[in-house]
Amino acid sequence: MTKMFKLTLLLFLLVGLIQCSEHSTAPTSGLPRNLTTAENNLINSNNKFGFKLFREVIEQENADTNVFISPLSVAMALGMTYNGANGTTEEAMRATLEFGNLTIQEINESYQSLIELLINLDPKVIFQIANSIWYRQGKVFEQDFLNINQTYFNATVRGLNFNNPNAADTMNEWVDENTNGKITEIVGKPINPLTVMFLINAIYFKGTWTYEFDPEQTQDDWFTLPNGSQIPCRMMTMGDELYYFQNDDFEAIDLLYGDGKFSMTIFLPQRQTYIDSLITEFNQENWDNWMSNFTKQFGIIELPKVKLEYGKCLNDVLKSLGMEIAFNRYQADFTKMRKSGGLWISKVKHKTFVEVNEEGTEAAAVTSVEMMESCIPGTPLDFQMRVDRPFIFVIREHNSQTILFMGKIVEPSWDGE
């Protein structure tokens, strides 16, 4: 599939999962209770973060790359990490995550109550959220930080011997279990000796359409790529009364799951509208306006079957969104995580899976925040050499003193991850 469907496949995993009333897709309709002010504010914060995260990922990806992310998973993993941030690092994360005037207590309590609400919202939809914190055995972290994440994020907290080759397998088995086998790995081998913690969120979603597509109506068809060429696809077809909306830029449809508490909202750009231009219009104000304009109309929807796996390191994306200090080993302040400091985020990895077929949708997402230490806390330094300017290096053989290579580096480059 082409990037035409990256919008389609993102939107149903936003925190503001669409729930439809008779003539509207207002995000609070059909809830078993009223949301608190803090919960509403957190949802708005996560949606704002999700929109700008998506726009930034699209901007950094190749124009013809499929993209599928879960802003909820990323926000929740970073939300756990946020409890360990302090000073200017805390301020940068607060701004990036759009927390606004929410207090840390309101953020944590709202995540706790929203997790419980979302996973029990629709008995016909499976929606699971799991969190975990894995730390290097022998390292000491603030008990308040661990307790907060256990209490409010229901996080599993466990110490592991990261030097053991099976440590990564243990964490990946947890990921595999909590995504129903759809994502099997987020922690690579070997674990860096300076890595001291992984904060991991896993989400699993499985919903059957309220009005399923008839498999007998699915036929071979063609899908047009951005360059005008065509590729074969399996096109599903359904005619019914469905929630629909169109304007000068796109036409959109809202397909319900289960009892209608969850849905997939599909945006198809008009032929004169470039998809990336439409993505730049995704913000909270436009979103609220669009959602209020869906009405039930009778029509036909043709939708290709989709199966997609996606993965991305989000370091550059989050730095661009204002969190650069959290990745700076010299400036990051996570003293609420460990009083002695010396911790920084080395990597935020994100992986997703989605399959859309006649019965419904199955999707999973995992986000891992990897924490490193700059040095061994409490150990005095004899020197600190920072190679941040042109340098020379020599490769030699010691016994014969043969020089094998010599080099001058003026502008270093690295093609690896």
Image (cartoon, rainbow, N blue to C red):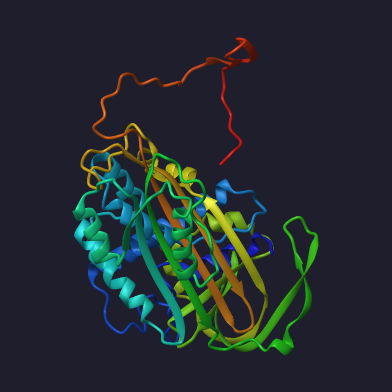
Viewed as shown, does residue 34 lie left or right of 77? left
Residue occupying the far top of the picture: 401
The C terminus - image quarter: top right
Whether residue 191 is visible:
yes
Q: Position of residue 219 (x, y in %)?
A: 77, 81
Q: Nearer the viewer, residue 413 or 371?
A: 371
Q: Nearer the viewer, residue 354 or 397?
A: 397
Q: Position of residue 43 (x, y in %)?
A: 34, 66
Q: Position of residue 137 (x, y in %)?
A: 32, 49
Q: Position of residue 162 (x, y in %)?
A: 41, 48
Q: Nearer the viewer, residue 167 or 20?
A: 167
Q: Quadrant of residue 319?
A: top left
Whether residue 283 is visible:
no
> Is 60 located above or below residue 209 in the figure?
above
> Is 409 located above or below residue 363 in the figure?
above
The N terminus - image quarter: bottom right
> Is 15 located above or below residue 236 in the figure?
above
Viewed as shown, does residue 243 lie left or right of 213? left
- Picture mark count: 0
Residue appearing at x 35%, y 21% in the figure: 384
Residue appearing at x 22%, y 47% in the figure: 336
